[in-house]
Amino acid sequence: MKPHAFPSLILSAALAFGVAGMACAANNPATGTADQPQTVSEILTFQRNLRERLDKPYGEYSRFDQAALSHMKRAQDKVFAMLQGVSSLDQLSPNQKTDLSNSLDEIKATLLANEGNRQICHRERKTGSNMIELRCETVADREAHARDSREAM
């Protein structure tokens, strides 16, 4: 596992926008340009536009099965709930920022159909210290650690 600073939230939001933005920015002016969202309103606007496209039975996202669509919509619902009434990412607590980053990464990973590379972050205390740090690892790394632990037992 490797520690990352909070800018990973902005990177996750940027990547989530960039992944789907590449596919739809030219086709749908409502999503804006290929610029990456840096604010709460940009994240929400992008997620709402993505939801509209996900709800269409035909189109660019029809390749996804119902399970993948449901997975993305659940992650989007978390994003909408976390950002309700929030005007700046600075208003979120460190735990909320981590949860938001994880939800945006879930959406991005599903869009890329690459769940193993989705990053999961959590906050933990360093051993022997009261300092809390952000730790991130990919789903594939997490599964490998679990498998290695089972094999060691």
Image (tube, rainbow, N blue to C red):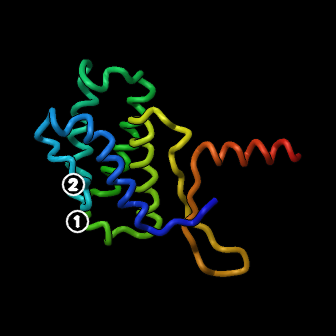
Left/right of residue 135 with respect to residue 99 in the rendered view:
right
Please, what is the three-letter code of the amino acid marked with disc 1? Ser
Crowd tier of the residue under label 1, counting other residues whose Cα lies within 10 Å: few below 14, some 14–19, many 20 or above: few
Label 2: state its secondary structure.
Answer: helix
Seen at 60% across and 79% down, the residue is 131
Nearer the observer: mark 1 or 2; the answer is: 2
Left/right of residue 34 with respect to residue 115 in the rendered view:
left
Of mark 1 and mark 2, the one earlier in the sequence is 2
Please, what is the three-letter code of the amino acid marked with disc 2? Glu
Q: Quadrant of residue 111?
A: top left
Left/right of residue 125 with respect to residue 153 in the rendered view:
left
Crowd tier of the residue under label 2, counting other residues whose Cα lies within 10 Å: few below 14, some 14–19, many 20 or above: some
Give residue 85's position: percent from left, percent from top: 24, 61
Give residue 6's position: percent from left, percent from top: 44, 67
Residue at far right of view: 153
- Of residues 152 and 76, which is closer to you in this image? 152
Marks 1 and 2, how far apart at CA: 11 Å
Seen at 16% across and 36% down, the residue is 26
Give residue 88's position: percent from left, percent from top: 26, 67
Residue 87 circle label: 1
Label 1: state its secondary structure.
Answer: loop
- Of residues 43 and 80, which is closer to you in this image? 43
How many numbered marks, from 0 up?
Answer: 2
Give residue 2's position: percent from left, percent from top: 60, 62
Residue 42 circle label: 2
Left/right of residue 107 with respect to residue 125 in the rendered view:
left
